[in-house]
Image: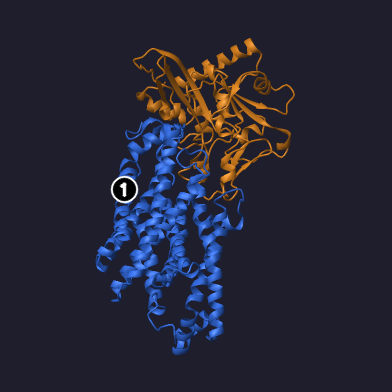
Chain colours: A blue, B orange
């Protein structure tokens, strides 16, 4: 027997089937959904203090959405057959909905981004020559109408799309949680709470991402950080983090208190194999510390200088990004560490460095959206500077 | 059962060569087969014939009509001696990669205090070494396991491309040409019956030797079992022994609380088994 295996495992339950890539996939889609929600807070719910991040969050959402299928492709045993999910879906499978939901959401986000930048695209098309002009004229779809009336229509459609986008974002990420929550064979995954936990942690990670991106972007581009915007983001982040962690704890507490048969294995799982990543990283470092930090930002506003408040909020958001990653790790890997015999544990999973499902590729996948955003920003600014859209 | 020094012998046996040990084993199996025929009047089986049939994946004969069959499987726990013949037979018949199992045997030692010692070294492939738990063992038994071919199986429900499917004769099979290797079915199987084949990168599991049973042959595991632990039934047949046992005896299924409705039944299943 393998020295790291403990207890009795079914003989086939030795390997971890879902690797780092499957940890990454819900993480990336979570960022997509969360960033979209931030943008909707401005577009639909009229949180005008979030205007400085309205564009950034939408473009961030699109950038991460573009790489979302990559971890799945890297994981599949037969990536070349992946399109079968879309062409010949088996509709009783939660996974088969991926193509449909992804396509719907991508269409929505692309349309929303296009409307956001339509006026600017037209401006660039008019002012440039050659290839650039051709490209932007194509992007403008040949319509150069920038009249007040046209802008009004743009705005109305954008609000409508953002409104439709909220349930779509919820479905996109709720569905990822559902893929785990509906596996009744797995004691750790199988709970109706799973989609809801995934959803709230997605929003948390999205808001945290925008907080970090916004501050970093403004610093790097030599602009001033909008205090009201950071304050508002902090408030939302605090609320969503509290909801997320409460749900995560509720799930565990319910299992423990019920003394359900699942707890037979989930209890030892958390206290042994997941002691560091769940209790240490996800709960204490990832949840308690940001809760206190954001509490300071939200409740002690008059006592904080702007730079101090921004720094604390930045730090809290960074830690929450780690918290959500830890949550994905604990669900995906933690749910596979125990055998379905409910009597033993597999060896702990350490991802390879290189290779198809390795750390290197994971880092590349995470970095691609930042490259996309940088290139995007060269032509279409992520930040709406005063007077820029007036022309 | 096999000593570690027997590697050479195992190798030769794996290559289908006749060794002294395999000769003795076949002779013993043949004799016990004769005994079974004499005592019970059952159909005799010949050790080794399981490995001489059609190649893997051969389609069912044209004359075979899957709608005229409805297979069920029965395991009689009290008869199992944990010799591992079934695991080895399955491995050879289906070219199961080393370290993966389409069928395996678990051993349970239960003491009066309720302490459980459970193991399945190498899936029980090489039998079991004697075990001393240091406690008074009041119950000890072997449990052969395989795919339960569940009627309400999550693996078929969750497969995103329909590569896992139910046949009209009540089996769950995997279409290797369609499988995308996402492992969702491996996650979904409550019994640990599935694995991703390390070479084909597709889901793999017990097929109840579909290439054999569609020709009227027994599965390799049933054919190899010297104790008649495993039985294949066909509920469509009028005087089917397995159907009769399921209908009249106290049979159980694994993890009934999950409501997967397994088609693999157990006689004498103890509550410790999951």
Quarter of the picture holding the N terminus of chain A: top left
Name the quadrant containing residue A128: bottom left
Picture residue at 51% right of the left edge, 53% below the top: A174
Identify the residue at image location x=62%, y=43%. Answer: B165
Question: Which x, y percent locates residue A191?
Answer: 50, 42
Q: In what element is the residue under mark 1?
A: helix
Location of residue B5 (image quadrant): top left
**Residue B155 x, y percent position in the rendering:** 56, 41
Which residue bears the numbered disc 1?
A: A281
Q: Measured from the top left, where is residue A54 in percent x and y?
A: 43, 71
Q: Residue furthest top?
A: B39
Rendered location of residue B47, percent (x, y): 55, 22
Is A244 placed left or right of A91 in the picture? left
Q: Residues within 10 Å of mark 1 (few under 14, many from 20)?
A: many
Total numbered badges shown on the rendered structure: 1
Parent chain of label 1: A
On screen, residue A266 above or below A80: above
Q: Is residue B235 left or right of residue B255?
A: right
Query: Of B187 and A140, which appears nearest the observer?
Result: A140
Residue B168 visible in the shown view? yes
For the C terminus of chain A, which image quadrant?
A: bottom left
Residue B98 showing in the rendered view: no
- Residue found at x 43% / y 51%: A22
* Residue depicted at x 57% and y 31%: B52
In this rendering, is residue A266 above or below A172?
above
Name the foreground residue: A271 vs B215: A271
């Amino acid at each position: 027997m393998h020295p790291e295996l403990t207890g009795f495992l079914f003989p086939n339950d030795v390997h971890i089937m879902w690797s780092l890539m499957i940890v990454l996939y819900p993480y990336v889609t979570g960022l997509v959904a969360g960033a979209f929600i931030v943008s909707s807070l401005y577009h639909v719910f009229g949180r005008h203090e979030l205007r400085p991040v309205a564009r950034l969050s939408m473009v961030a959402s699109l950038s991460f959405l573009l790489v979302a299928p990559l971890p799945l492709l890297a994981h599949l045993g037969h990536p070349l057959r992946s399109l079968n999910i879309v062409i010949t879906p088996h509709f009783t499978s939660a996974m088969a909905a991926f193509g449909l939901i992804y396509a719907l959401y991508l269409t929505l986000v692309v349309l929303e981004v296009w409307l956001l930048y339509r006026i600017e695209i037209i401006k660039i098309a008019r002012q440039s020559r050659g290839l650039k002009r051709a490209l932007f004229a194509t992007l403008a779809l040949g319509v150069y109408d920038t009249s007040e009336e046209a802008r009004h229509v743009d705005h109305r459609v954008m609000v409508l799309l953002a409104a439709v986008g909220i349930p779509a974002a919820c479905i996109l990420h709720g569905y990822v949680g559902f893929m785990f929550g509906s596996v009744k064979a797995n004691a750790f995954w199988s709970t109706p709470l799973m989609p809801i936990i995934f959803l709230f942690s997605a929003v948390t990670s999205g808001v945290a991402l925008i907080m970090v991106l916004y501050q970093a972007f403004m610093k790097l581009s030599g602009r001033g950080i909008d205090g009201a915007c950071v304050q508002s983001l902090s408030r939302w982040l605090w609320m969503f983090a509290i909801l997320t962690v409460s749900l995560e704890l509720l799930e565990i507490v319910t299992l423990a208190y019920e003394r359900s048969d699942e707890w037979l294995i989930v209890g030892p799982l958390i206290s042994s194999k997941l002691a560091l990543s769940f209790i240490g990283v996800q709960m204490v470092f990832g949840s308690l510390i940001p809760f206190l930090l954001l509490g300071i930002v939200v409740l002690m506003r008059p006592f904080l200088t702007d730079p101090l408040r921004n720094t604390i909020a930045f730090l809290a958001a960074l830690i929450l990004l780690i918290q959500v990653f830890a949550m994905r790790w604990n669900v995906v890997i933690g749910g596979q560490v125990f055998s379905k015999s409910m009597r033993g544990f597999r060896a702990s999973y350490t991802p390879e460095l290189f290779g198809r499902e390795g750390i290197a590729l994971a880092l590349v996948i995470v970095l691609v959206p930042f490259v996309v955003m940088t290139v995007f920003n060269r032509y279409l600014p992520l930040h709406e500077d005063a007077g820029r859209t007036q022309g | 059962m096999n000593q570690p020094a027997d590697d050479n012998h195992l190798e030769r046996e794996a290559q289908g060569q006749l060794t002294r040990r395999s000769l003795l084993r076949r002779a013993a199996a043949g004799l016990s087969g004769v005994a079974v025929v004499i005592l019970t009047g059952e159909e005799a089986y010949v050790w080794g014939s399981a490995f001489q049939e059609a190649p893997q994946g051969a389609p069912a004969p044209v004359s075979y009509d899957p709608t005229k069959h409805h297979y069920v499987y029965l395991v009689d726990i009290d008869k199992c001696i944990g010799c591992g013949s079934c695991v080895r037979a399955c491995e050879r018949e289906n070219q199961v990669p080393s370290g993966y199992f389409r069928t395996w045997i678990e051993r349970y030692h239960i003491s009066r205090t309720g302490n459980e010692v459970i193991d399945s070294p190498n899936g029980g492939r090489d039998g079991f070494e004697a075990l001393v738990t240091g406690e008074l063992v009041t119950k000890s038994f072997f449990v052969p396991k395989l795919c339960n071919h569940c009627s309400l199986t999550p693996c078929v429900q969750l497969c995103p491309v329909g590569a896992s499917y139910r046949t009209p004769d009540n089996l769950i099979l995997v279409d290797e040409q369609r499988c995308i290797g996402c492992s969702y079915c491996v996650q979904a199987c409550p019994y640990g019956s599935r694995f991703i084949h390390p070479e084909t990168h597709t889901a793999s599991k017990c097929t109840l030797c579909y290439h054999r049973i569609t020709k009227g042959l027994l599965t390799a595991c049933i054919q190899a079992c010297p104790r008649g632990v495993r039985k294949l039934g066909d509920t469509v047949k009028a005087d089917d022994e397995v159907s009769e046992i399921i209908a009249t005896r106290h049979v159980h299924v694994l993890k009934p609380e999950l409501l997967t409705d397994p088609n693999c039944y157990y006689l004498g299943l103890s509550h410790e088994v999951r």
